[in-house]
Image: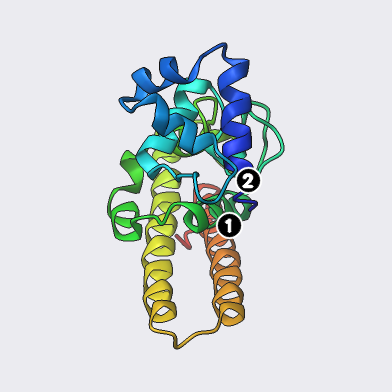
Amino acid sequence: MDLKLFPIRLKQAREAAGLKQNQLAEMIGVTAQTISAYESTKENKGKTPTLDKATHLAALLGVSLDWLCGSQKSMSNSDEDINLEQFLEKFVNLDHFFPLELKALADGFHELDMGDFFGRDFDINCLNWAFLPDDPNSKEKALLCRENVFRDFFQNWGNLKEIYKTGAMTDSLYETCMEGLIKSCASRLEEQLKIFFDSRNGNNRY
């Protein structure tokens, strides 16, 4: 993630929306000077918004927070088709810029509006959910599998992050552990869904 891109892209998105700094400021409840600081590329004048303000800005301007933070090339997620690993990496990338409340994410993932994180056009169902069923009852059970994996991911990530903060882990080790956690969560979900659909097809392993 290129943190220097945020002020540049914020200004680009604001101008594309035809808004002046004072107009955007009024819409999110800050001063025009604050917007100017958000858009400043000068270290001594720049200011980083909170996650709440950044997601509000992204929503108002119709862009992805990923894009604002420099981890995505396209402004919009509307045509994006991603897998689970890429989806989880989005949160890791955002955490570099806006530290996330991982416990809150673990406890309330099912209540989250993904548009708050990734832009108003983002649809969690754009993920490549192999084997996702069409009938409502089966789909509900499959989605529960998905939410359980997400909850465990954020819990385990939170534990890793606490250890990392103590200095007991190097940057390299932390990154390696996070890569492994993301891969294991993706594999776990795929395996659970396979077991679930084997059960639906008459093989009672679920």
Nearer-the-camera pick, 19 or 173: 19
Quadrant of the image occupied by residue 8: top right
Residue at 51% over, 22% down = 61
On the image, the x and y values in percent for residue 128 come to: 64, 42
Q: In this view, does 144 lie to the left or right of 82?
A: left
Residue at 34% over, 43% down = 110
Q: In this view, does 120 lie above or below 111?
A: above
Q: Residue furthest top?
A: 18
Tell me the number on the disc at residue 106: none
- Residue type, numbered disc 1: Glu
Q: Is residue 20 above or below residue 158?
A: above
Residue at 62% over, 79% down = 172
Question: Judging from the image, what secondary structure is the residue with disc 2 in?
Answer: loop
| Viewer can see residue 133 | no
Label 2 environment density (alpha carbons within 10 Å; few <14, some 14–19, many ≥20): few
Q: Are marks 2 and 1 in contact (CB under 8 Å)?
A: yes
- Residue type, numbered disc 2: Ala
Q: In this view, does 191 lie to the left or right of 54?
A: right
Q: In this view, does 33 lie above or below 51?
A: above
On the image, the x and y values in percent for residue 77 come to: 62, 31
On the image, the x and y values in percent for residue 156 come to: 40, 70
Q: How many marks?
A: 2
Q: Residue furthest front?
A: 44
Q: Earlier in the sequence, mark 2 or mark 1?
A: 2
Nearer-the-camera pick, 191 or 80: 80
Q: Is residue 51 above or below residue 161?
A: above
Tell me the number on the disc at residue 130: 2
Q: In this view, does 92 lie to the left or right of 138?
A: right
Residue at 50% over, 50% down = 44
Nearer-the-camera pick, 58 or 91: 58
| Viewer can see residue 77 | yes
Tell me the number on the disc at residue 190: 1
